[in-house]
């Protein structure tokens, strides 16, 4: 059965010292907490990944990268490959975040290639997607989300879905302080689970964790996470503060 997950996306925040100190605080606070079926993940910047992964080893915190390149190696100045992530002890990668799609031109085609490269290297993928405000206003949000999932993931075999985590992040709610209502989140998450079941089968759909992202904070997490098809959150701003982040972990 699927796990509950709280994943902190630190984005371009925290230098090496701040990253080490944040992961230290989080691991310490979680030490005595029984997490049962909950996974806790943090995603620092590339420069801090190795140290954070080292500090998190043997704790209840897992470490993810925020991005990677689809090629194995070569002339791709400034990029990092899946193999390189593995070499520093990272086993999870976030792909398709709306900021990557919007500011760095990541298309569905590129993302499908990145997903393949990640899975070939035995990385677990947190795959993000979500509609912009105009899509929602014009009631295209379901079709936009469906096409992002279809183009990024539906070429995969059912067995590959053991290593996929979905993250629905309505772009209008990211970093804006605006959140989808728990009902809006549930409605979309149920839709997502249904299209996965239709494409594959009910077992694949039931086993995949679907996270909600977009201004989740301690004050609204409980209500959102209590929805049947919401299996946790991908958290930006509130993940930068250890106390807030731990509150989110306790929200299930
Ligand atoms: P936010 O970011 O929690 O700051 O809205 C979420 C995300 O982009 O993953």
Image (spheres, rainbow, N blue to C red):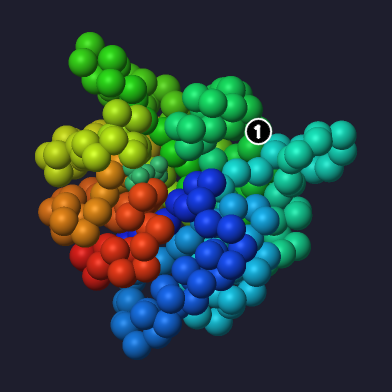
* 247 in relation to 112, above or below: below
Q: Quadrant of residue 142?
A: top left
* 6 in relation to 210, above or below: below
Q: Nearer the viewer, residue 206 or 224?
A: 224
Q: Quadrant of ligand 1?
A: top left
Q: Quadrant of the N terminus?
A: bottom left
Can residue 152 be seen?
Answer: no
Q: Quadrant of the C terminus?
A: bottom left
Q: Which residue is mark 1?
A: 113
Q: Residue furthest top?
A: 138
In the rendering, at what x and y percent does residue 167 appear?
A: 39, 43
User: Which residue lies at the image location 74% right of the left edge and 46% below the top edge?
Assistant: 81
Q: Residue furthest bottom?
A: 32
Q: Residues within 10 Å of mark 1 (few under 14, many from 20)?
A: some
Task: Indicate left or right for 29 with 108 as reference.
Answer: left
In the rendering, at what x and y percent does residue 211 appear?
A: 34, 49
* 188 in relation to 166, above or below: above
User: Which residue lies at the image location 70% right of the left edge and 37% below the top edge?
Assistant: 70
User: Which residue lies at the image location 42% right of the left edge and 82% below the top edge?
Assistant: 28
Q: Nearer the viewer, residue 107 or 201?
A: 107
Task: Indicate left or right for 139 with 171 as reference.
Answer: left
In the rendering, at what x and y percent does residue 6 appear?
A: 36, 60
Q: Quadrant of residue 117?
A: top right
Count of numbered badges drawn on the protein = 1
Q: Nearer the viewer, residue 149 or 83?
A: 83
User: Which residue lies at the image location 33% right of the left edge and 39% below the top edge?
Assistant: 175
Task: Indicate left or right for 65 with 36 as reference.
Answer: right
Q: Secondary structure beneath disc 1? A: helix
In the rendering, at what x and y percent does residue 57 appear?
A: 58, 77
Can residue 33 be seen?
Answer: yes
């Amino acid at each position: 059965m699927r796990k509950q997950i709280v994943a902190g996306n630190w984005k371009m925040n925290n230098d090496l010292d701040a990253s080490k100190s944040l992961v230290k605080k989080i691991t310490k606070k979680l030490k005595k907490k029984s997490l049962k079926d909950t996974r806790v993940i943090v995603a620092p910047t590339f420069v801090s990944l190795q140290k954070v992964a080292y500090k998190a080893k043997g704790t209840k915190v897992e470490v993810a990268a925020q991005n990677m390149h689809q090629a194995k190696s070569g002339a791709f100045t400034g990029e990092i490959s899946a193999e390189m992530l593995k070499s520093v002890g990272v086993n999870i990668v976030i792909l398709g975040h709306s900021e990557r799609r919007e500011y760095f031109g990541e298309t569905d085609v590129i993302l499908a290639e990145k997903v393949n490269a990640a899975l070939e290297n035995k990385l677990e993928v947190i795959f993000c997607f979500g509609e912009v405000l105009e899509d929602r206003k014009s009631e295209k949000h379901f079709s936009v989300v469906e096409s992002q999932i279809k183009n990024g993931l539906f070429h995969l075999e059912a067995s590959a879905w053991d290593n996929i985590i979905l993250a629905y992040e309505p772009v209008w709610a990211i970093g804006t302080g605006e959140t989808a209502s728990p009902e809006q989140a549930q409605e979309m998450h149920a839709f997502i689970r249904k299209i996965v079941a239709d494409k594959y089968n009910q077992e694949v759909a039931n086993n995949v964790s679907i996270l909600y992202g977009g201004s989740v904070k301690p004050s609204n997490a409980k209500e959102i996470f209590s929805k049947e098809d919401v299996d946790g959150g991908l958290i930006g701003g509130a993940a930068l503060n250890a106390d807030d982040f731990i509150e989110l972990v306790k929200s299930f």
